[in-house]
Image: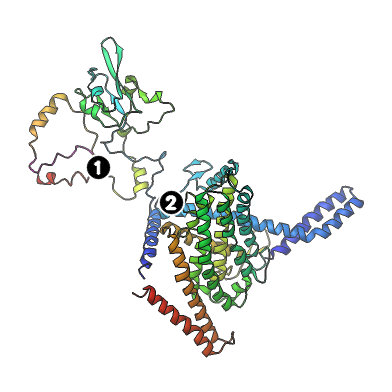
Amino acid sequence: MGVVPLITRPLWVTLKYLVRGLRRRPATVLYPFEKVRLPCQWRGLHRLDDEKCTGCGSCSRACPNMCIDMVQLAPKKKRPSIDIGRCLFCGYCVDACPFDALEMTGNYELAVFSREELIMSPEALTKVQDVREGTVDEELWKRVYGDEPVPDYPPLPPKPQKGKKDAAKKEEPPRKDGTEKPPECGFTGADKAVPGEVAK
Amino acid sequence: MDLYSTMHGLVSWLVNGILGLLEGAGMRGPVMQLVRWMYGALEHAITVAVVVVLILVIGLLMVILMLWIERKLIARLADRRATMLGIMGIGKGTGAIQLFADAIKLLLKEDTTPRKADKYIFAVGPSILVGSSLLVLVAVPMSDGFAASDLKDGLLFAMAVFAFAPFAVFLSGWSANNKYTLMGGMRSATQMISCEIPLLLSIAGVVMLAGSFRLADIVHVQDRTWFILLQPVAFVVYIVAMISEIERIPFDLPEAEAELVEGWQTEYSGMKFAFAMMAGYIRGYIGCAIGVILFFGGWSSPVPAYTVDLPWGGRFSGPVPELWFLVKVLLLFMFLVWVRAGLGRVRVDQIVTIGWKRLLPLAMFNLALTVALMAFSDDIGTSPPVAGAAFVIPAACLTAAFWRWGWFR
């Protein structure tokens, strides 16, 4: 009678999910009305800090999809404009920027009605508002995840200062086991389980 | 409730009221006499038409309710949400509106026919399917008297017409001139041949116990004990064969989405597709209704009779057997939804194996057991030795067969 568990097990599993879904809400989130909180490494739409940008064009050269154009705004002022339709959100431009003028926000709702609107001008890039800069909706979390505790999201990483970045690099000794330092932000739990952290 | 006499009273009250009003308004003469004479001649035909329409509307409302239950329940069984469209907007309702939206969408869509299809048969296929499915509703009573027709051989009629649908499916699949529809139709025929015989054999045990093909009689025999307790094997065979007959997962081979686009319905669009879907759910309702009548005591209610004084005068005497019947049907349908959420689709060779090698012996075994047990009661005149032989020989064959198939290993 090897066939009986093949019938009873899936029925039991589905029944379990039914009962669990009645106790608290199902796993799905009603997207346009409810949104899950994004991890802070999330790479969404870029934001440009117009004060810091010098118009050097490093981001444009680093872009693998060649979607960043340097736009001549004034006689000595060039700023990047990004074609979101071609962007693959790799974040190389943010890494390449020597003045930390570019950063990636959590914005992911980028649908527009025409392809022209996908090309973000420098002015539009400076006005981007990061959706992650709100707080966790505790009530929504309770409805979706029940009594599960809200994970302790670290705050968004502070914008590193140019001079201190190099100093911090020197202070950190290379790790013996070869692992890299865990990222400063992200979902908790997984980061804490890095073996290097325990040895330290 | 006697549906026919109630409707007859209603119709004659309406017609007489209207005619009385007209006569009161001064319309007398040969024309009114002719109208009265025609009404007298057509009285019963009109009543039958009203009864039939009522049964049809109840069947269609049940289809809508079952669709809604299926969508909501299968979503919850899969730990997700179903449609939540409400009058106030998306995400604020129970999703009941979504069904009407879907129906209106399907009815308004363009009705296309493939160029190389056999156009006449292509159009006739869904008509036969819907027609034969609705015809079974005639024979399925919802209580004593609440039926379009209280047939003496109601169960026979229902099963005979019920078995007609694979023919329509095969016709549609063949006529669309598409390899997927053709394969769907072929599979439907295969499946029907494999599972129709066990289905009827499982019903035979119940019919022997009840001693009648009349569905109301079968319900009344179960006043003390439901047949699921006396015929558990028959119920298992019945429910598996019935899921196969109404072509639901795990036996929805004729419309296997993963393999055959949409199976035999691939080329249908718009209203024909809506009709094909509706026929599927009507068949689901009929399968559950006959299952409830055969094994779960039909419209017998778990609460004893009671009477309530209504605040506006008059008395209400319950329980309402029709409501209890529908509740039982929906509960059995929820079991089918659960099975659909849990199990995967079987292969074609597996459905044939299940039908011929598993269900058929089980049904035969059940039949032999029923004969043997009935021989010891006074209801049947068979002698104990005959009954013993009738039980032992099939049981021995079955045991040998199970041994051969490795069921005991």
| Residue B258: mark | 2
Same subunit, labels 2 and 1: the answer reads: no
Would residue B385 be counted in the magenta stretch? no
Query: Which quarter of the figure is the N terminus of chain B placed in?
Result: bottom right
Picture residue at 39% right of the left edge, 64% below the top: A7
Crowding near the residue tagged with mark 1, few <14, some 14–19, many ≥20 C-alpha atoms within 10 Å: some
Q: Could you tell whether B255 is left or right of A124 in the image? A: right
- Chain of the residue displaying label 2: B
Q: Looking at the picture, how far across and down is residue B292, in whole percent?
A: 55, 67
Quarter holding the C terminus of chain B is bottom left
| Residue type at tag 1 | Phe
Q: What's the residue type where badge 2 is placed? A: Ala
Between the residue at mark 2 and the residue at mark 1, the CA separation in whole angstroms equals: 37 Å
Between residues B398 and B324, which one lies in front from this camera angle?
A: B398
Residue with the mark numbered 1: A187
Helix, strand or loop for the magenta stretch, by majority: loop
| Magenta region | A175-185
Relative side of A194 to B231, left or right: left
Q: Residue furthest top?
A: A75
Q: Secondary structure at mark 1?
A: loop
- Measured as percent of width and height from the top left, residue B150 is found at 67, 68
